[in-house]
């Protein structure tokens, strides 16, 4: 009978739990704030944002509440799941958010699901946003997203090592010029070689990410992967030159380059294992205070090639879904995000999208990465990624495997020719 | 090991021994040999268990240690197992993050509802299938597994759309129903095997004593398979507690569960290992407690049917 009693107790407990859970569910007690997405006509909106970008918009939301009376609830999602979630909700026509922060590579995929916001792109606005971003925001003749923040790769280097008297003398003796932040790729190669000793490496080579190689392609004077008519140009001389250069750095980088991604490269640099890295500018302000390199890092603009300085911007755009019933409040928030764009700089990530916002901080201590970032984003060859809905697929299935094989010693000409065929098949 | 071989190894009996002594000695040697064999087997088993424990336990221990590391320690190259400096900073940071406590409540609600739904549906279904062995029952139990054969992402997006159309978007109940689609098929299979192990004579005896069929189920069969129910409940609870994809697709502000919040520590701009491992460690506590609480039932459930005859 004791077993029976136990079962009865468990059933009673289960019943109570269910009742409590159902009541709590009905009351929405489990959530931090009531949802209003798509409920219509209110001044409360839901903003879907990648977890890392949440802090960027928190200050904006507070200001927007004061100025425009718009209450903002953030829906945070991990980057890897966000595309699926957006696809799912856009395809169902029933969205749980009123504004979405979209990665630039997703804009072409969701162009039919979001509203044009041409009225927000006045001449003054266009002047204060980096040219490549203004161009990217315009899909099929309409502006469909306002950049909330942007990023680009710059050069981060170990200032303490570069300023060390012995290193300076040794470098001068070996290479015949002064050790300083590199301004040409030849210098970058020399410095990488110089610092590769005693368990340390001059730089890293990231085989698991494509952006860096694509920046070299732009610097070599070619559009990346696709030309303006969507012809595949990945096998041209610029792509080959860029790839050969990229691979040539592997001898002065930690082994296993094929598996090195952003996180690995950032760890290596923060641990003091590499003397230089080409990395997204936000990393400068995210060096842990207890890192061996804290306070010892310098920043320089991305280096130019024959076509000039070029980087691949990494902006995020705020877009308003067609399916929202809170269009007015949503657009008010997007406008707030532009008006108070510099609030993002005060966040942990510390980025913005307006040139004036970056300029406001560029001379302040702690923001030394901003001048190189502005210079890179304004670079004459800087360009955004091709506007094709298949871009992510091209990256995942063609470009990354290509790079991984190349850094592992593959024949670059053959790999590029093979990649061209694969991309043409994907675009058919 | 044969007796003969043991005798040979033990050597001939001393000449002064009485006639019965060699037999006893041989038996003694046999017992000692068997005992030694048992000890060796036990030692090997303990070593294997220890290896298995390390293999299973190490990732969790590493997670636990990482949660006490400083930011730079979490990304040390090469990695260290123990923190160089112990800190609770990661716990403060993770638990202080907005939405974390709410996500815990949501996870508990969702897992409890999903577990109860699974049991309420699986117990009668499994009982019916095992006691009324009909062709349709056999088809049903096979068909129940079909949902396990489809990749979750294939049903996740349609399920999210259906819940949204039903006005259940962003509610724990919607997620619970979705989680039940994962746990129900295996719950039915598990419960079926447990019901199979209960002799029909028990029910017949209860019927003779005046129980109805349902009465026999409630008063006799269910108490006998309570260990199995505990196992099934834990399985269903864990399936919901750890589920990520449906939670990602179906929840937003009101019902986001902790696995999604944990994943949010990995952003496009970096990975906060410390906070992520701290929250994951805290999130493991309820499951560990539940398992300890029901440990006796689980063992009973696992051995249920092992001696049927």
Image (cartoon, helix red, strand yellow):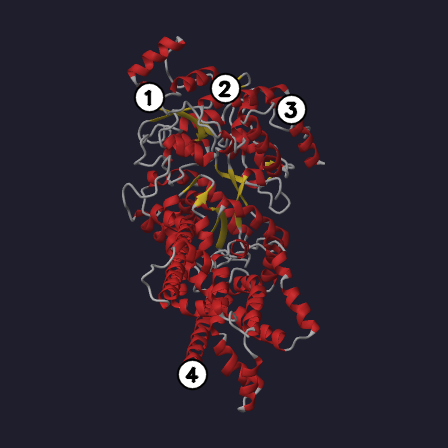
Q: Nearer the viewer, mark 2 or mark 1?
A: 1
Quadrant hosting residue A8? bottom left
The residue beneath circle 3 is A414
Q: Which mark is residue A1?
A: 4
In space, the residues marked 4 and 1 are separated at their CA atoms by: 77 Å
Q: Are marks 1 and 3 in contact (CB under 8 Å)?
A: no
In space, the residues marked 1 and 3 are separated at their CA atoms by: 39 Å
Classify the position of the C terminus of chain B by image quarter.
Answer: bottom right
In space, the residues marked 3 and 4 are separated at their CA atoms by: 77 Å
First-in-chain label (4 vs 1): 4
In the displayed structure, does residue B198 sit left or right of residue B52? right
Q: Is residue A73 visible?
A: no
Question: Furthest residue to the right?
Answer: A428
* Same chain check for tags 4 and 2: yes
Does residue B75 lie above or below A371 as drawn? below
Q: Are marks 3 and 4 in contact (CB under 8 Å)?
A: no
Secondary element under disc 3, as helix, strand or loop, is: helix
In space, the residues marked 3 and 2 are separated at their CA atoms by: 27 Å
């Amino acid at each position: 009978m004791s077993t029976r009693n136990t079962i009865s107790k468990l059933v009673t407990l289960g019943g109570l739990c269910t009742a409590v859970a159902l009541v709590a569910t009905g009351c929405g007690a489990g959530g931090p704030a009531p949802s209003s997405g798509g409920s219509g006509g209110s001044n409360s909106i839901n903003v879907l944002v990648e977890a890392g970008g949440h802090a960027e918009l928190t200050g904006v939301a507070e200001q927007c509440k004061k100025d425009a009376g718009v209450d903002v609830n953030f829906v945070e999602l991990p980057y890897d799941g966000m595309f699926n979630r957006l696809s799912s909700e856009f395809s169902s026509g029933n969205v749980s958010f009123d504004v979405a922060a979209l990665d630039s590579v997703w804009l072409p995929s969701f162009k039919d699901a979001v509203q044009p916001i041409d009225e927000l792109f006045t001449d003054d606005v266009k002047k204060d946003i980096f040219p490549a971003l203004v161009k990217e925001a315009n899909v099929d003749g309409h502006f469909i997203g306002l950049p909330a923040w942007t990023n680009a790769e710059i050069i981060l280097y170990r200032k303490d090592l570069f300023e060390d008297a012995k290193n300076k003398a040794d470098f001068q003796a070996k290479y015949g010029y002064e050790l300083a932040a590199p301004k040409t790729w030849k210098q970058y190669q020399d410095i990488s070689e110089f610092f590769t000793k005693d368990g340390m490496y001059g730089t890293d080579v990231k085989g698991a990410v494509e952006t860096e190689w694509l920046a070299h392609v732009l610097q070599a004077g070619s559009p990346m992967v696709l030309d303006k008519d969507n012809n595949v140009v990945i096998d041209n001389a610029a792509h080959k030159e860029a790839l050969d250069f990229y691979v040539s750095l592997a001898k002065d980088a930690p082994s296993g380059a094929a598996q090195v991604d952003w996180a690995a490269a950032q760890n290596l640099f923060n641990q003091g294992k590499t003397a230089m890295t080409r990395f997204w500018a936000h990393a400068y302000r995210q060096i842990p205070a207890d890192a061996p390199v804290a306070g010892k890092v310098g920043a320089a603009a991305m280096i130019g090639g024959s076509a000039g300085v070029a980087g691949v911007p990494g902006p995020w755009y705020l877009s308003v879904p067609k399916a929202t019933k809170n269009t007015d409040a949503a657009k008010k928030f997007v406008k707030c995000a532009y008006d108070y764009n510099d609030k993002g700089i005060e966040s942990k990530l510390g980025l913005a999208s307006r040139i004036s916002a970056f300029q406001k901080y560029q001379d302040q201590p702690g923001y030394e990465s901003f001048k190189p970032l502005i210079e890179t984003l304004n670079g004459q060859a800087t360009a955004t990624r091709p506007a094709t809905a298949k871009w992510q697929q091209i990256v995942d299935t063609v470009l990354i495997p290509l790079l991984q094989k190349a850094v592992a010693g593959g024949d670059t000409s053959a790999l590029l020719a093979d990649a061209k065929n694969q991309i043409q098949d994907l675009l058919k | 090991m044969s007796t003969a071989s043991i005798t040979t190894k033990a050597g001939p009996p001393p000449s002064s021994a009485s006639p019965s002594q060699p037999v006893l000695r041989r038996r003694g040697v046999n017992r000692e040999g068997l005992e030694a064999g048992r000890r060796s087997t036990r030692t090997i088993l303990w070593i294997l268990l220890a290896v298995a424990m390390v293999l299973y336990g190490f990732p969790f221990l590493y997670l636990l240690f990482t949660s006490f590391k400083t930011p730079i320690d979490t990304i040390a190259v090469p990695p260290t197992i123990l923190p160089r400096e112990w800190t609770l900073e990661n716990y403060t940071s993770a638990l202080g993050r907005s939405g974390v406590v709410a996500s815990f409540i949501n996870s508990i609600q969702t897992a409890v509802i999903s577990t109860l739904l699974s049991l309420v549906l699986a117990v009668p279904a499994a009982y019916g299938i095992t006691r009324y062995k009909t062709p349709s029952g056999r088809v049903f139990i096979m068909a129940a597994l079909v949902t396990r054969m489809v990749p979750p992402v294939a049903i996740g997006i349609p399920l999210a759309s259906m819940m949204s159309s039903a006005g259940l978007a962003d509610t724990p109940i919607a997620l619970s129903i979705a989680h039940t689609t994962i746990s129900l098929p295996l719950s039915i299979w598990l419960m079926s095997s447990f019901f199979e192990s209960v002799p029909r004579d028990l029910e017949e005896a209860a019927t003779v004593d005046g129980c109805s069929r349902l009465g026999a189920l409630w008063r006799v069969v269910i108490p006998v398979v309570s260990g199995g129910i505990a196992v099934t409940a834990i399985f269903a609870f864990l399936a919901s507690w750890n589920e990520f994809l449906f939670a990602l697709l179906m929840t937003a502000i009101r019902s986001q569960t902790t696995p999604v919040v944990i994943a949010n520590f990995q952003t496009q701009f970096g990975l906060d290992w410390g906070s992520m491992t701290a929250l994951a460690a805290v999130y493991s506590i309820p499951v560990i407690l539940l398992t300890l609480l029901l440990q006796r039932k689980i063992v009973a459930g696992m051995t249920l049917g092992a001696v049927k005859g």
